[in-house]
Amino acid sequence: MQREGPPLELLLRRLTEIPEDFLAEPRIGSSGVIEVRAVVGDLLRRCGQVPNPAALQAFAGVDPRQDRNRLAVTLIVAWLLAEDWFQRAQLPAADLIKVLREDVAEIAPLVAAKKLVTDPERREEVARLVLAGLGCRPAGESVAQAQDRLTTLSSVERARVLKVSQVAARRAREIREALARKAAEESADKWTRE
């Protein structure tokens, strides 16, 4: 997040103005409308990069249940990355692909694609996630401010904290049950001695 990126408001407005085409059903097999590989390839060309056909294969869907939301989120992020600022920044294709593949794969199981456009907090989350994935922060924010706000909004972080708290709760329950068993055994031993 060392590099200052575009103003956050610019990205949030871009997400609210997303065309319906980018919200259409991604093509998976013979169903769907939008070929995500083509959109990602066009984005890379628009950013002055030469798309690698092997890298684009990651944006083909195979299983509708597993791939639909991931590809739908990819379309939204591709729309965001088509903002002029990202083109002028001349970011390496590997960085763009990383955001489109890895960062999207993290958030897609947790948030429905349409929420990234309709919910104000999810819009901000995806904008900040994209910037962070590219090593940028919103214009006018310090690194600490940008990181703190991303952590506050992050669905990935929230899921991680929830998982940790569930593990801790399960462990506490196991300890209580073990203590209760031990107390019952000690009580039974006491009665048998008397």
Image: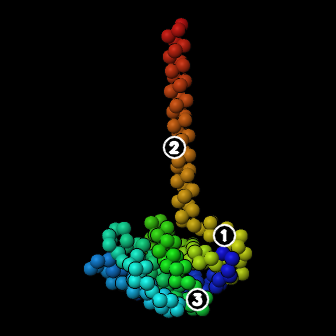
Q: Quadrant of residue 162?
A: bottom right
Q: Is residue 117 left or right of residue 31?
A: right
Residue 122 shown left or right of residue 25 in the figure: right
Callout 3 crowding tier (Cα within 10 Å): few <14, some 14–19, many ≥20: few
- Report which residue position mark 2 lands on: 170
Q: Which mark is residue 180?
A: none
Asked whether residue 63 appears in the rendered view, the answer is yes
Identify residue type, mark 2.
Answer: Arg
Report how far apart the C-alphas of labels 3 and 2 lie in the structure.
48 Å
Of the numbered discs in the image, which one, if any, rests on residue 90? 3
Q: In the displayed image of the protein, which residue is found farthest to the top?
A: 194
Task: Tell me the quarter of the image containing the N terminus.
Answer: bottom right
Instruction: Calculate the distance from the C-alpha at mark 1 to the C-alpha at mark 3.
Output: 23 Å
Sequence-first tag of 2 and 1: 1
CA neighbours of label 2 inside 10 A, class few (<14), some (14 to 19), many (20+): few
Q: Amino acid at mark 1?
A: Gln
The residue that mark 1 highlights is 147
Mark 1 surroundings: few (<14), some (14-19) or many (≥20) residues within 10 A: some
Q: Secondary structure at mark 1?
A: helix
- Helix, strand or loop at mark 2: helix
Instruction: Give the x, y percent position of residue 167.
Output: 53, 47
